[in-house]
Image (cartoon, rainbow, N blue to C red):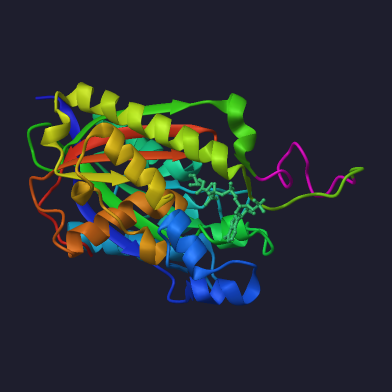
Amino acid sequence: MKRTAVVRGLGSWLPPRLVTNHDLAQQLDTSDDWIRSRTGIGARHVITPGVATSDLAVQAGARALKSAAIKGVDAVVLATTTPDYLCPATAPLVSARLGLGNVPAFDVAAVCTGFLYALATAAGLISSEVADCVLVIGADTFSTVLDPQDRSTRAIFGDGAGAVVLASGTADEIGALGPVRLASDGAAAKLIYIPSGGSRDPFRTPTARQADPFFRMEGRAVFRQAVEHMTSSCIAALHDIGWTVDDVDLLVAHQANLRIMHAVTDRLGVPRCRCAVHLDRVGNTAAASIPLALDNATRSGLLLPGHRVLMTAFGGGLTWGACTMRWPDIEPG
Ligand code: COA
């Protein structure tokens, strides 16, 4: 039987500091009511000064390795939009701190779809026999790129990390990943972007206009695109594996906004009680969103061994995707 990537371990980490909607309302013209009713978010975890993305990734990665009961892997793939440095990638730093030796380690940049892109990349390393076992991490500290005065983005994003261990197995095992659907549309890149600090507008070059180092997002347009693309990629991923909507035990959508998640759930015809909701306590944690939601659903008993899981995400790029999985019999680390 064809080599297939199978999930063998799961772990996550949230920085301890919690920022509630009430805390935000002390600093910005917003309210708990507004944020809850428009997004479903009540609080988010935020790093303290001196903590970086790799610090969260190391914690999540260590827990995933413990969950898989292994000490080493053959590669590390890390999805992030908020690396510790522009150069080098964050994955080698994480790999070294986890004591994984000289294994290949690299970052994947697909913003909030990053975890699905990293999963597909790791699954490819396994199916092409480059690796037998890969640590896949989604980690982001969006608090480091948000405009302190921008109430629409500060209300949404939180920091966190989640990780899985993928190992070589067969498609009939529980834990096996189905085909991953991925897509992008760079023509709409400026709906979600950070204008300055990259090679298009490096900080070190004096320009006529003021550099803008902050994350910018056209909320309404993003909302519409997210619903449309997550719905269509879910339909494609279900088609690829030969499941119907009724086969789905749990929909784990990128935790962007509860209204977006419910719109996708309703359009697909999945009952809302089968949609994993975690963002009320963590907000949108970008690349960490899906593994954090998987970890939470496993711990709360919503996700059980053998369950059919449909995962989908949407983010800057624009990027989007979906994939299916039979949930394995694992304990989060
Ligand atoms: N508190 C109070 N008012 C706020 C606010 C906040 N936190 N954020 C925005 N507003 C205001 C806006 O300034 C605007 O005021 P105005 O009419 O005086 O200009 C008003 O609310 C309506 O703004 P709009 O952007 O149209 O609101 P919305 O209902 O679309 O909600 C988002 C804004 C950002 C919550 C929503 O568009 C959204 O969630 N979009 C998707 C974002 C997302 O998921 N991104 C990640 C994708 S990976």
Q: Is residue 165 left or right of residue 14?
A: left
Q: Can residue 104 be seen? A: no
The location of residue 69, given as percent across then percent down, is 17, 60
Relative vertical location of residue 29 with respect to residue 114 in this rendering, above or below:
below
Residue 199 falls in which quadrant of the image?
top right
Magenta stretch contains residue 67: no
Quadrant containing the C terminus is bottom left
Relative vertical location of residue 208 with respect to residue 277 in this rendering, above or below:
above
Magenta: main secondary structure equals loop
| Identity of the residue drawn at 66% across and 45% down | 194
**Count of all numbered marks drawn on residues in the image:** 0
Which of the two residues, 177 or 323, is positioned nearer the viewer here? 323
- Range drawn in magenta: 194-206
| Identity of the residue drawn at 56% across and 36% down | 221
| Identity of the residue drawn at 19% across and 64% down | 299
Which of the two residues, 24 or 180, is positioned nearer the viewer here? 24
